[in-house]
Image (cartoon, rainbow, N blue to C red):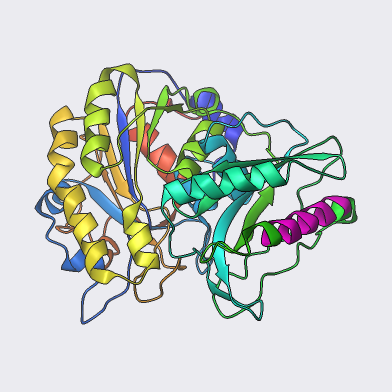
Amino acid sequence: MVDETIIRSLAVKTTSKIVLLVMDGVGGLRVDGKTELEAAHTPHLDELAARSICGVADPVSPGITPGSGPGHLGMFGYDPLLYEIGRGVLEALGIGMELGKSDVVARGNFATMDQKGIIVDRRAGRIPTEKNMELCALLQKEIQEIEGVQVEVRHGKEHRFVLRFMKAGLDGRIEDTDPQREGHPPKTPTPLVPEAEHTAEIIKLFVERANRVLQDHHPANTVLLRGISQIPAIPSMSDLFKLSPACIATYPMYKGLARLVGMEILETGEGIVDEFKTLKKHYKEFDYFFLHIKKTDSYGEDGNFEKKVEVIEEVDRHLPVLLELDPDVIAVTGDHSTPSLLKGHSWHPNPFMLCSKYERIDDVQEFAEAACVKGGLGRLLAVHEMPLMLASALKLEKFGA
């Protein structure tokens, strides 16, 4: 990518507006001859593609399967190889935690473990959020401190929660305890550097105590920890790109990532229709909007091809709300691919389209993988999307004499 000092020097503040619509995990693989995007009825997305320039984007690098953090950072214009942000930090910021520099946080899953200590469901059947709140309150009551380290447990949505350890001198460079697939035991929290050995032991003691507290609460009878991390230093979008950015999202992690790069978090309802209404309500207040759709990814991870198709079609039905606002730049893509066929994130590039009166139009007539790969942008890295959006909004000055 272009060096940040160069981007900062070229970026200018203007009144033009950019909307980045992200359907999380939207990319897929063909089942019975079609991907989810190809199977979906999407007249509005296809019409937009017909007046856009298209391509496919690798979130990190060809062949690398990204997590949600790196996937979004690239789209926001940050090199994901330079800024490695743990999922725990993103979840914590997403639910409004104010983190200290020495705090260590993790994103937790309530999970189901059998009598042999094997994980049989990494998400505990996606327990209701109300049950999550009850269990987090129980853990907080029973585990407030471990060897002088303060412990905070905060609920998220469904099976997710945030775990925070507070004391000077902690080090978050520790491996996840989540085995990432069923049929395996939880992993032991292992330090990646010698400085993290004490913190790893504290986390190990927490998991042991949590298992005792939860033993009678099947299916949520254990916890898995991911993204054990500490808050990094990262420049804001207003500093780098001279933007006034806003985030419209329903899940904590994406709000957390947006907050980390300086976006204003807009309150919205739970549904896709609510998110588009929020965009319309606040449209005059900001010049950059990140509008995030989660369920495309959720159904992809569940292996539910039909439901993922339904979410794509629902986005398409509400797209006229965005089109009627007529922003200077509209970009549509995903942060990574989540093919239903694989039931997880994959290394496949994401379809990407960029609509602006200042962009050349290619011959692509459909927003789908095979169509976009033939587009005028070809195959690019996601980190290049932000300079393209800024340029198309006339927010970048000329480089050099």
Left-right relation of 224 to 56? right
Indicate the position of residue 329 as horizontal and vertical percent values.
Answer: 27, 34
Closer to us: 160 or 248: 160
Q: Is 134 included in the stretch rendered in magenta?
A: no
Does residue 208 lie above or below 329 as drawn? below
Closer to us: 196 or 53: 196
Query: Looking at this rendering, what residue extends furthest in the front direction?
Result: 216
Main SS of the magenta segment?
A: helix
Q: Residue at x 82, y 42 (%)?
A: 170
Q: Residue at x 17, y 55 (%)?
A: 313
Can I make out residue 84 in this image? no
Magenta span: 198-211
Could you say which quadrant of the image residue 225 lies in? bottom right
Does residue 324 lie above or below 57 as drawn? above
Could you say which quadrant of the image residue 275 lies in? top left
Indicate the position of residue 152 as horizontal and vertical percent values.
Answer: 68, 39
Left-right relation of 243 to 56? right
Can I make out residue 134 in this image? yes
Left-right relation of 55 to 254? left
Indicate the position of residue 316 as horizontal and vertical percent values.
Answer: 16, 49
Q: How many marks?
A: 0
Closer to us: 384 or 174: 174
Q: Residue at x 25, y 49 (%)?
A: 53
Does residue 294 lie above or below 369 as drawn? above
